[in-house]
Image: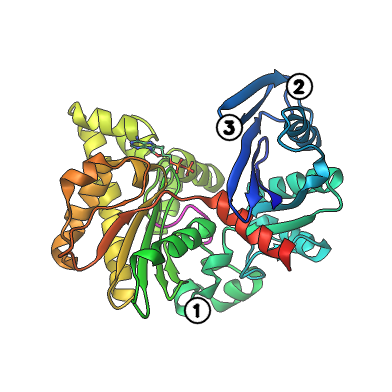
Amino acid sequence: MSKVMAVNAGSSSLKFKLYEMPEEKVLCSGNVERIGLEDAIFGMKWGNESEKKILPVKDHAKGVELVIQGMLEHGIVQDMNEIVAVGHRIVQGGKYFSKSELFDEDTEAKIESLIPLAPLHNKAHLVGFRAFKQILPNVVHVAVFDTAFHQTMAPEDYIFPIPKEFTEKYDCRRYGAHGTSHKFLAQEGAKYLPGVEHPRIISCHIGSGASITAIKDGKCVATSMGLTPLGGIMMGTRTGDLDPSVMNYLCKCTGISVEEMYQIFNKKSGFLGVSAVSNDSRDVLAAAAAGNKDAQLSLRLFTRRIADFIGQYFVRLGGADLIIFSAGIGENSWEAREEICKEIAPALGLSIDYEFNKTLRGKEGQISKPDSKIKVVIIPTDEEVMIARDTYAFYMK
Ligand code: ADP
């Protein structure tokens, strides 16, 4: 039995989960939020217990100390050396990483060189990693990349039709995101396809960030997010794909700078922008039910974009055996699933048990009927366990 930690470090936060591997038993989980402030929040859950403290946390190293202290204090570990490996979530692995990698100096340098492609994320991940490395110097550290799963795409699926020198000089191409989740969904989804020789899966990770991936034989062949997580389908606050002229046109019309407009496309668009209600689909659904026309339109836009991608990937895969819904909206919103399925059912030959669909919230289940040409399932995603699996595999090497 080995204790393995999965870590997700943001610029002012540190999420963690400790597993007993290979059983994948969660021993504890928690979060340090508002790092750098006098009133930072440390929260931890274990078994049926939990604690929350508000205290000054000056930096990530202090945050890591708190996490380890908490685990010792509550007897989750007797000695911090029981933790044998730490897996770190990294948003951008660029062209370098097609799988998880040992977090050595070379990996660290490459992640650093990729900061321009993910300025907020990669920088924060490195700060988190260095803080852990300082406190747990002798354990195995592994970098697990959101982009790695998508590295199997063919050039025609990841190259943008821009001048070749831009592609080559600046590595400007599609990288995708949520790869750890799509990989997990592909692995879990395989159990619905016994005896299928070359399984074709369309996985829909739809939360506040959302992406859709076409998977064949367990490998990504296409994914909706692009150079950054702004691309693809419409999201909580992000536009998804747009005609590139929209940027130029709106900057000219409004006098707003490119940088500011880019922030608007990232933070004030999507559900929030179209509905003018909220970025949270729950609020938008409630407003739509109460008759708000903009909220209704934003929901139709959202489901239409998803249906379009599913149709595109159905063609890309030469058919499909399984469609998976996952993440905040995919797991919890029967309304969104129903709308999407109704859009694609006639063309793809789906037969859906809409009554059963209504009963599924946050748990796994199959909503397609036996006569459906494609199985449709809900699988709650678990990026942390995927990080723990990859990390444990390195430890066992
Ligand atoms: P992310 O990890 O990208 O931040 P999540 O996967 O946690 O996002 O998804 C968050 C979104 O899921 C929320 O914005 C909300 O719109 C949606 N969501 C969560 N629970 C429900 C629910 N019960 N019904 C409808 N939507 C929900």
Sequence-earlier tag: 3 or 1: 3
Which residue is depicted at the point 67% across and 58% down? Answer: 391
Sequence-earlier tag: 1 or 2: 2
Considering the image in quadrants, where does the C terminus appear?
bottom right
Indicate if the residue with disc 1 has its beta carbon within 8 Å of ligand 1.
Answer: no
Name the amino acid type tagged 3: Gly
Residue 155, numbered circle: 1
Residues at discs 3 and 1 in contact (Cβ within 8 Å): no
Name the amino acid type tagged 2: Pro
- The vertical placement of 26 against 374, above or below, is above
- The residue tagged 3 is 47
- What residue occupies the far front of the structure in this picture? 1
Residues shaded magenta: 227-232
- The vertical placement of 352 against 255, above or below, is below
- The vertical placement of 256 against 42, above or below, is below
- The vertical placement of 197 against 294, above or below, is below
Cα gap from disc 1 to disc 2, whole angstroms: 48 Å
Q: Is residue 61 visible?
A: yes
Callout 2: SS: loop
Q: Residues within 10 Å of mark 1 (few under 14, many from 20)?
A: few
Counting from the top left corner in percent of width and height, residue 383 is at 54, 51
Side (left or right) of 202 relative to 139: left
Cα gap from disc 2 to disc 3, whole angstroms: 26 Å
Number of labels in the image equals: 3
Name the amino acid type tagged 1: Pro
Callout 3: SS: loop
Q: Give the quarter of the image for residue 192.
A: bottom left
164 vs 122, nearest the viewer: 122
- The residue tagged 2 is 56
Side (left or right) of 307 relative to 87: left
Q: Residues within 10 Å of mark 3 (few under 14, many from 20)?
A: few
